[in-house]
Amino acid sequence: MPAASSGASATHAVAPAPSSPAPSSSATDTRLTPGGPGYRRMSFALFLAGVATFALLYSTQALLPLVSADFGVSASTASWTVSGATGALALFVLPLSALSERFGRRAVMTASLAVAVVVGLVVPFAPSVEVLIVLRAVQGAALAGLPASAMAFLAEEVRPKALVAAIGMFVAGNSIGGMSGRIVTGWVAQAWGWRAAVGVVGVVAVLCAVAFRVLLPAPRHFTAGTLSPKSLARTVRTHLSNPLLCRLYAIGALFMTVFGAVYTVIGYRLTEAPFSLPQGVIGSIFLVYLVGTVSSAAAGRLVARLGRRGALYLAVSTTAGGLLLSLSSSLALVLLGLVLITAGFFAGHAVASSSVSRTATEGRAQASALYQSAYYLGSSAGGTLGAVAFHAGGWAGTVGLGILAVLGVVSVTVWGSHAARAQERRGLVAAAR
């Protein structure tokens, strides 16, 4: 099955950049590969960066009912403590990725984590929900330097055949960070309140940031670019004129709309009848993120067996099935639904994000930044719209929003398949002439 048919090939890739030369043979390729020197350190360092990123970015998500109660605000207002962070990340990821082209991926990732963890230690002292939202937006803007730079770092430093697996490990770190942050905050908040809970997350993120900087190997294949606004605008226009990349950006945004909606609202649903669960138990439910760790790390094997289109369809089907199961009034079925939603989301995200890095051979940081912008705008939209849908129609309203987003992923993938077949037919006709 051609990769292009999945909306994830390099059919429209732009010319290679000097910063990521293609070696003439595997014997002369000095990029990292599984089992080779430095690969394990690099993987673990970026895994820890992923842990810190998601733990900080979503530190208030499992605590929204407590935030609502403390400040006397609605679910939709409290949801902005998550949507504000993800929205700011989406806005700043492109300019910070440009800085990584000039000053290096490792330098930008280090600075991003440093600022984010400092803000994370201030967040517990927010005197009002407005200040809390502003601090969370600053934190999200700081974290914007990490995801796109990490993917560009991997695209430059890892051999192409190992790229999906390497990015899968970074995404797996995201899932571990999201899970551990929510579990820790749930139990700490039950005993000492939400402020202590987000403070603990900040301390854990500091430790991850220090370990990341110590472990990450120095880049060997990076060549500094310029900060020319014209050059940046030209690169962005090139990526946005690439139909394949635009489809991948849409897929990432739609998958994250589902995920953002579900995990922003699920705490409110589980505190209500018929479940009426305490905060610590609700936090522990995020153990299902372990499924995301497995599914994202296995994305490379899924693509090898099913092709990119097949892997995306499997991810979509799994997510949709989980949404429908979550409508049940049985806690066991709701949990199973969350497992399926999580597995489908992380698998789909790993396939789409790795396809972006594989497709864009020039301006990789900007290509990844545009994907991250779409991805986190999807998260912000999902969190806000999910809360609005929950207020209007209960959990069924949130599920309905998720189903619409899933249908959007299917439509984009089918459209990509049709476009690939049409291009192939045009190529055959041209060759026959």
Image (cartoon, rainbow, N blue to C red):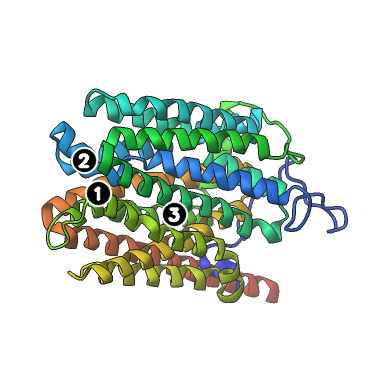
Q: Residue 336 occupies which quadrant of the picture?
A: bottom left
* Residue at 33 percent of width and 66 percent of height: 407
Left or right relative to 289: residue 326: left
* SS at mark 3 in the image: helix
Residue underneath mark 3: 252
Work out whether 344 lies above or below 94.
below
The residue under label 1 is which amino acid type? Gln
* Residue at 47 percent of width and 52 percent of height: 176
**What crowding class fits label 3: few (fewer than 14 Cα within 10 Å), some (14-19), or many (20 or more)?**
many
Residue underneath mark 1: 279
Q: Is residue 292 visible?
A: yes
Distance between the Cα atoms at labels 2 and 1? 9 Å
* SS at mark 2 in the image: helix
Q: Residue 334 occupies which quadrant of the picture?
A: bottom left
Residue 303, horizontal then vertical, whole percent: 58, 69
Residue 338, horizontal then vertical, whole percent: 33, 64
Residue underneath mark 2: 66
Q: Is residue 15 visible?
A: no
Say if mark 2 contacts mark 1, CB within 8 Å: yes
Task: Please identify the quadrant where the N terminus is shown.
Answer: bottom right
The residue under label 3 is which amino acid type? Gly
Distance between the Cα atoms at labels 3 and 1? 30 Å
* Residue at 37 percent of width and 40 percent of height: 86
